[in-house]
Image (spheres, rainbow, N blue to C red):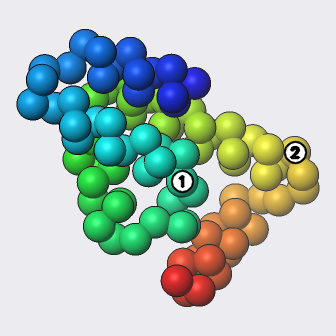
């Protein structure tokens, strides 16, 4: 879903924005706990400039939480895992 949205938005983007959008492909797929501060900053910039990509990224995160809950994790478990993974960077 994110890739389809990214491609559509890239085709509709102004010429000066296309290289930036194209360079964000893997940041959209990467788990937030695996991002460097620079990549996270670039992703936030991209999401701020494009509402549809922001919605697709948010839906991905929501789906991840649903899957975690279906597997028996609760929000505190999810938060604990994120904090633990953040500390391993």
Residue 39: percent from the left, percent from the top?
Answer: 35, 61
Residue at disc 1, secondary structure: loop
Is residue 48 in sight in this rendering?
Answer: no
Residue named by callout 2:
70
The structure residue drawn at horizontal position 38% and vertical position 15%, both measured from the top left corner, is: 8
Against 62, is 74 above or below?
below
Looking at the rendered image, the quarter that the N terminus falls into is: top right
- Label 2: how many residues lie within 10 Å, few (<14), some (14-19) or many (20+)? few
Question: Could you tell me residue 59's position as x and y percent?
Answer: 56, 33
Q: CA distance from mark 2 to mark 1?
A: 22 Å
**Mark drawn on residue 75:** none
Tell me which residue sits at (30%, 23%) in the image.
10
Badge 2 element? helix
Q: Nearer the viewer, residue 30 or 59?
A: 30
For this view, does 63 lie left or right of residue 24?
right
Closer to the camera: disc 2 or disc 1? 1
In this picture, residue 47 sits left or right of residue 16: right
Where residue 74 appears, as percent x and y from the top left, is 78, 58
Give the x, y percent position of residue 49: 21, 34
Q: Residues within 10 Å of mark 1 (few under 14, many from 20)?
A: few
* Residue depicted at 90% across the width and 52% down the height: 71
Instruction: Decide if residue 57 is in sight here.
Output: yes
Q: Nearer the viewer, residue 86 or 38?
A: 38
The residue nearer to you, when weighing 76 against 65, is 65
Lateral position of residue 55 relative to residue 81, left or right: left
Seen from this angle, which residue lies furthest left? 16
> What residue is pinned by disc 1?
30
**Mark with earlier residue (2, 1):** 1
Please determine whether, in this image, residue 11 is positioned above or below residue 27: above
């Amino acid at each position: 879903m994110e890739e389809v949205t990214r491609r559509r938005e890239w085709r509709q983007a102004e010429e000066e924005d296309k290289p930036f959008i194209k360079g964000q492909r893997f940041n959209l797929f990467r788990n937030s706990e695996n991002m460097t501060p620079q990549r996270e900053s670039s992703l936030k910039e991209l999401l701020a400039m494009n509402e549809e990509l922001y919605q697709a990224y948010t839906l991905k995160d929501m789906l991840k939480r649903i899957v975690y809950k279906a597997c028996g994790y609760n929000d505190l478990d999810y938060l604990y895992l994120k904090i633990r993974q953040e500390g391993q960077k």
